[in-house]
Amino acid sequence: IDVRITGSGLFTPKYKITNEELVESYNAYADKFNAENAAAIEAGEVAAKPHSSAEFIAKASGIKSRYIYAKEGALDLDRMRPLIAPRSDDELSHQAEIAVDAAKKAMQAAHKSAADIDVVIVSCAYTERAYPAVAIEVQAELGIRGFAFDMLVACSAATFGMHRAYEMLAAGTAKTVLVINPELVSPQVNYTDRDSHFIFGDVATAVILEKGETATSEHQYQVLSTKAVTQFSNNIRSNFSYLNHATDLAPYAADMLFHQEGRKVFKEVCPMAAEHIETHLQAHSLTPTDVTKWFLHQANINMNTLICKKLLGRMAEQSEAPIVLDEYANTASAGSVIAFNLHHASMQSGDYSILCSFGAGYSIGSLVLQKI
Ligand code: CO8
């Protein structure tokens, strides 16, 4: 089976929020909250909001800034969430817009036109509506025939989407598949929670997968195999749901937004991910030292450092296991694809790499790649 990734695309929003800006806004919000709730805090009925710190964020996560699709509102003390203008049914939706941008770049890199593509998968942590699928809207906007569908797998949406593309190509039911990850996650961030307000950024990534026989692009990566595992955990969760209309639960309540037990996630996911990667490589009689590039999920720099250390027995260089977290923050499923997009070109023919996601679900997904 000769299935290859032959192009990738990256959409980066034009707005950026540094740790300093984020912390300044959060701390002012916390002071205002504490002043307004002084009596209740004094009576022990409400917990005071502690200050956040830019130094803590950089040290605990490796994040220094994040991009945001709509900056207005997110830092406004009376709002603390992005302000995104609703669009009519006739307009291209927000998520489709960023998906189309990344898709066009991937198509260009892979030398593909709309006529070459027959499947579009939009795979990400959230879609902005249930139907019609965002993928079908993107398909129409790009003028692609065939079929399209959405899928949600949180942190592993990008890798799991590529897995489905690989299977369709291997089975002969598709000739060229476009997999897009429009991670418009800022509306689900709780900017009033110091434990998580810094974690996420918006982005969109896309890749083209096709059979070797049709591939013509400059950089091609054969997918040697795919591997996935999931294990249920409530340690990363959002309860936002279409059921909210019926359950009468407040749509902005903290548990409707992203929340996690970060320490537990760290402890449980690192060994799972390291073991998963090692087993996947073993299936090809490869060891971690045979891998030239590690395109790893970007949730926390200390997680990536630990996983690389477990596998390599030493610290990985930035050139081996590129980190994009400092600039992009955690972008849900897109992090490993951003790392791939920005750092694949220096690989030589015959070099091996692994692209791997790990996180919410829990879910882990990997692809072993070899440069043609
Ligand atoms: N400023 C200052 N102090 C802080 C802050 C802050 N902003 N935040 C926490 N602290 C405090 C804590 O309250 C704590 O204080 P105390 O000791 O008094 O209780 C102290 O600092 C230490 O806190 P932690 O133990 O929580 O700190 P950690 O070193 O564990 O760092 C992290 C916290 C960064 C969250 C870390 O645990 C982590 O990254 N863990 C891994 C989490 C992870 O990978 N999560 C996956 C995310 S899910 C995903 O990738 C996709 C989900 C789908 C998309 C959702 C989009 C919205």
Image (cartoon, rainbow, N blue to C red):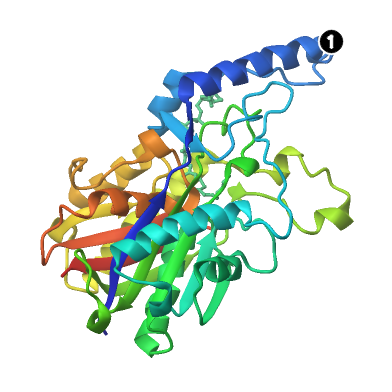
Q: Residue at x 55, y 75 (%)?
A: 148
* For residue 213, above or below residue 311: below
Secondary structure type for disc 1:
helix
Compared across the picture, whether 193 is left or right of 147 comes to right
Q: Residue at x 57, y 70 (%)?
A: 140
Label 1 near ligand 1 (CB < 8 Å)? no
* For residue 271, above or below residue 301: below
Q: Could you say which is closer to the camera, residue 105 or residue 69?
A: 105
Q: Could you say which is closer to the camera, residue 62 or residue 21?
A: 21
Q: How many marks?
A: 1
Compared across the picture, whether 285 is left or right of 189 comes to left
Compared across the picture, whether 104 is left or right of 42 comes to left
* For residue 77, above or below residue 167: above
Instruction: Give the percent coordinates (x, y) of residue 129.
Output: 69, 60
Q: Residue at x 32, y 67 (%)?
A: 367
**Residue 276 appears in view:** no
Q: Residue at x 48, y 19 (%)?
A: 20
Instruction: Give the percent coordinates (x, y) of residue 263.
Output: 49, 38
Instruction: Give the percent coordinates (x, y) of residue 33.
Output: 74, 17
Q: Which residue is mark 1?
A: 39
Q: Could you say which is closer to the camera, residue 368 or residue 45?
A: 368
* Quarter in which the N terminus is drawn: bottom left
Instruction: Give the percent coordinates (x, y) of residue 224.
Output: 25, 74
Tell me which corner region of the image, top left, top right, bottom left or bottom right, holds residue 242.
bottom right
Residue sitting at the far left = 349
* Quarter in which the C terminus is drawn: bottom left
Tell me which corner region of the image, top left, top right, bottom left or bottom right, holds residue 195.
top right
**Residue 12 appears in view:** yes
**Type of amino acid under label 1:** Ala
Crowd tier of the residue under label 1, counting other residues whose Cα lies within 10 Å: few below 14, some 14–19, many 20 or above: few
Compared across the picture, whether 273 is left or right of 133 comes to left
